């Protein structure tokens, strides 16, 4: 079984590089709260985006159960550049869901990001077919993976996915269950 974890609430500050953004005070509390939700799932391997907020979301659980976190570059956020405003960013994200090949200069298209994460997930599923794994990553990245399984998982589901979230995925049946 694969459990996808969207990182907890983070601090957005355009002056901080995307990979270095940390959790907010609320996000740190949310990360602690995830321990009791993740413990019964019998997770044996943990993978994470190299972004600080993704690592910090899964770290309290990993420490509690004595597991290492393996950083996986393929689980990083889709490459995008800062925008002049939230409205500009939101419009670009919306357009990228309408057209998976849409790609502003120096951005990664949804199609490219989806291919990147799906290839890595396939590799991990083959490597760990008999154990439960957790992947701590980002809402858009995880939503693009879920879209590959279920085409109904699109812009609106991405937009409504809370921080943090735990999603159980059964690849054999194509089932997606949002646990929180």
Image: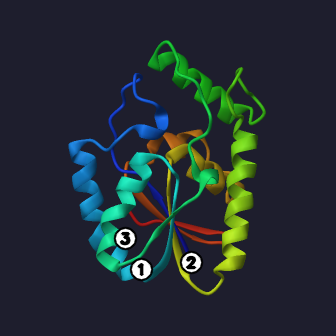
Give percent across and percent down for residue 36.
27, 73
Q: Which mark is residue 62?
A: 3
Considering only order in the chain, which callout, 3 or 1, is on the residue closer to the N terminus?
A: 1
Q: Quadrant of residue 93?
A: top right
The residue mark sitting in front, 3 or 2, is 3
Question: For the point 66% across and 71% down, which residue is it?
Answer: 124
Tags 1 and 2 touching, CB below 8 Å = yes
Give percent across and percent down for residue 19.
48, 39
Considering only order in the chain, which callout, 2 or 3, is on the residue closer to the N terminus?
A: 2
Q: Residue furthest bottom?
A: 130
Which residue is the site of mark 2?
1
What's the distance in space between the residues labelled 1 and 2, CA to CA? Answer: 9 Å
Question: For the point 67% across and 57% down, which residue is it?
Answer: 150
Residue 180 seen from this side: yes
Residue 48 vs residue 67: left or right? Answer: right
Secondary structure of residue under mark 1: helix
Secondary structure of residue under mark 3: helix
Give percent across and percent down for residue 114.
70, 48
Quadrant occupied by the N terminus: bottom right
Q: Which mark is residue 41?
A: 1
| Residue 1 versus residue 28 in the image, above or below | below
| Residue 112 versus residue 45 in the image, above or below | above
Give percent across and percent down for residue 72.
59, 57
What's the distance in space between the residues labelled 3 and 2, CA to CA? Answer: 17 Å
Please name whichever residue, 128 or 145, is drawn nearer the observer in this view of the structure: 128
* Crowdedness near tag 3: few (<14), some (14–19) or many (≥20) residues, C-alpha within 10 Å: many
| Residue 124 versus residue 146 in the image, above or below | below
Q: Residue furthest top?
A: 84
Considering only order in the chain, which callout, 2 or 1, is on the residue closer to the N terminus?
A: 2
What's the distance in space between the residues labelled 1 and 3, CA to CA? Answer: 13 Å
Secondary structure of residue under mark 2: loop
């Amino acid at each position: 079984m694969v459990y996808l974890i969207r990182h907890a609430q983070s601090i957005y500050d355009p002056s901080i590089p995307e990979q270095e953004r940390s959790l907010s005070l609320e996000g740190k509390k949310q990360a602690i709260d995830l321990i009791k939700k993740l413990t019964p799932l019998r997770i044996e391997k943990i993978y994470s985006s190299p972004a600080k907020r993704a690592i910090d979301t899964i770290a309290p659980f990993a420490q509690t159960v004595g597991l290492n976190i393996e950083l996986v570059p393929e689980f990083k956020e889709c490459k995008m550049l800062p925008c002049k405003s939230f409205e500009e960013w939101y419009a670009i994200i919306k357009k990228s869901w309408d057209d998976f090949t849409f790609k502003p200069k120096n951005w990664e298209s949804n199609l490219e990001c989806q291919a990147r994460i799906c290839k890595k997930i396939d590799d991990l599923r083959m490597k760990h077919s008999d154990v439960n794994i957790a992947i701590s990553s980002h809402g858009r990245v995880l939503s693009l993976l879920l879209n590959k399984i279920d085409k109904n998982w699109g812009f609106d589901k991405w937009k409504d996915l809370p921080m943090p979230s735990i999603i159980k995925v059964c690849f054999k049946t194509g089932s997606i269950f949002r646990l929180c």
